[in-house]
Image (cartoon, helix red, strand yellow):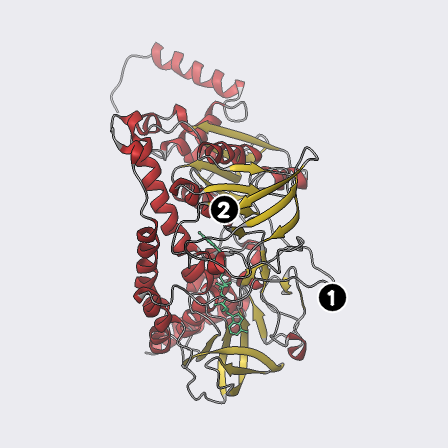
Amino acid sequence: MAELEAEAAALLDALDAGTATVDEVLGRLYGKAASPDAQISRAGPEVTITTAPEHAMGPSACEDVKSTVAHVGPRDHFPALEKRYDLVVIGAGVAGLLSVITAKALGKRALLIEKHYMGGDCLNVGCVPSKCLVASAKALHNARASAALGVVGGENLKIDFPRVMARMREIRAGIAPHDGVARYARDFCAEVIIGEAAFADGESVTITARDGSNRTQTVAFDRCLIATGASAAVPPAPGLVQTPHLTNGNFFNLVALPPSLGLIGAGPIGLEMAQSLARFGCKVVVFEMADRLLPREDADAAAVVGQSLEADSVVIHTACRILNVAGPETMAYEAPFSKYEVRVLLQDGSEQVVKVSTLLNATGRAPNVNNLNLEAAGVAYDARSGVHTDDCYATANPKIYACGDVASAYKFTHVADWQARCAVRNAFLDARCRRSRLLVPWCTYVDPEVACVGASALDLEKAGTEYDTYVRPLKEVDRCKCDGVKQGFVKIRTWKGGDEILGATVVAPHAGDLISELTVCMQNGVGLADLAGVMHPYPTTAEAVRQCAAQYWFSPAFKTPAAALAIRRRGEAVAARPASTF
Ligand SMILES: Cc1cc2nc3c(=O)[nH]c(=O)nc-3n(C[C@H](O)[C@H](O)[C@H](O)COP(=O)(O)OP(=O)(O)OC[C@H]3O[C@@H](n4cnc5c(N)ncnc54)[C@H](O)[C@@H]3O)c2cc1C
């Protein structure tokens, strides 16, 4: 025991002296490379952003929906609370869930508050349901395209859309207990409560029940984490806000496949869903304000996605403006679908009225900062960038932290996860885990997938960084030839003349998996020269990563004239000697 105390005291001394860090003790969440610290420009106090209304999960008669809601959003779960908690977390999306798990590991008592569904967007109306649809669409597409591989008869396959959606609901229901009230109340929190939270002042939060009773309770906190996420923003296109339409919040309530769909916004969320529906047989028209798809990705990556969508018969209008939206008074989730008329100004200056049977708005995400009474808590925020924090996730009130979609330019589940762990370590251990040190990979799950880590070409050009680019087209990789993959590439960006990786983009059937190898390299300072020397199994798509890196071995930066001459001379010298064994 005395030995343990002495060892702990020595470690504590090292932490206090700064020769060891909390991260080294608990596990490092970042390493030698970081992504550009993306910031969303702040909006003035006069700016408000309209967001889509909160939707109940549907269809309400579905047993899997009932079961999911019973686990993640029982409206009447409003237990009597204690007066004070070490940590009060507002929002039980990924950021909220990871924050209470981390707090529990630190021995802290947390209260977790959720107003709608635990698991947040990711489980209920985001990553999980969208990837289920993507999987069905991909299975159909691959089967239809299999004639080229000698598998005939797939061309006439049809989709059973109600079954696709039922499968999605079943998978979501299977995950729900994992993110649900019972598990979190039992394993990680002092208490979980379903209700809407707002600050009473800078040290306490009031929670209002959502069962219609309007009961309230107020609790004090030592530390608070705002993890309220983001909602679908409704752009000020004339007629749109007044016309009931789909967003990610109600898209997964669809019961039947609409004959046609207009998609406003060609970002990752919209395109994943649009491509899936197009493959199921829905006629999809995309309206994008920017001059190309996926404006955050490299242009060559977006171009491959564009070709793939066109092959799926998706009609894409870029650089266009919505002039007016007219549609029904109620939303249809099954036949008979309604009629929407979208009047657009196209790139060539002409106007067109596009008629579709449903409309999906996926133009962006607005941070959930309203109705939290942030002013009373002394927390600064704005409608566009969300809650203002410093690099260690602290708000203007040092007892209150914020992370995840409500306070991050990178709006991804894994980012919310990492930020929550960091924020809680900072709140209770003064760990100084900095947002700007995170290395962020991400993936858009269209087909082919587009994954990126670190700095994009655009980031480097904006920063005026001189860099080299190494590209390996997949059509030159043996495994891809066998699989019939003709599009896509691995692209790595390094400092000019060096092999340190600054960023990478992969466009491939499983780009989201392939990017992790490059992320490990970047985070641990493994450059192209070393990556090129790592044996990969043959034949795999991942060989493309090594082959891309191996180009560095033949670049003038590595293979200098002096090195080439030295190797030649060495060969000559060895040849001149009698052969020897080692
Ligand atoms: C269609 C779609 C697909 C996506 N796919 C992916 C993907 O494949 N990979 C990926 O990494 N990311 C994906 N994302 C993004 C990902 O879902 C988000 O980045 C992630 O959910 C953010 O987690 P969060 O905890 O910050 O917020 P959220 O998940 O939004 O959770 C916030 C929670 O706070 C609650 N809340 C808000 N206000 C209050 C209040 N006043 N009181 C109590 N509770 C409150 C909300 O009800 C919500 O449950 C997708 C998003 C969408 C919309």
Percent position (x, y) of residue 309? 47, 36
Residue at 55% in and 42% down: 286
Percent position (x, y) of residue 510? 38, 40
| Kind of residue at badge 1 | Pro
Camera-side residue: 577 or 272? 272
Question: Exactly how many numbered labels are in the figure?
Answer: 2
Percent position (x, y) of residue 29? 46, 57
Judge whether 414 appears above or below 15 on screen: above
Q: Quadrant of residue 408?
A: bottom right
- Residue under label 1: 45
CA–CA distance in space, label 2 to label 1: 35 Å
Q: Earlier in the sequence, mark 2 or mark 1?
A: 1
Mark 1, secondary structure of its residue: loop
Residue closest to the far front:
336
Residue at 48% in and 48% down: 442
Judge whether 423 appears above or below 234 on screen: below
Q: Residues within 10 Å of mark 1 (few under 14, many from 20)?
A: few
| Kind of residue at badge 2 | Leu
Camera-side residue: 578 or 321? 321
Q: Is residue 346 visible?
A: yes
Q: Quadrant of residue 220?
A: bottom right
Percent position (x, y) of residue 472? 45, 28
Q: Relative to 500, is 103 on the left or the right?
A: left
Label 1 near ligand 1 (CB < 8 Å) = no
Q: Relative to 561, is 39 on the left or the right?
A: right
Residue at 51% in and 24% down: 555
Numbered label attached to residue 442: none
Mark 2, secondary structure of its residue: strand
Q: Residues within 10 Å of mark 2 (few under 14, many from 20)?
A: many
- Residue under label 2: 261
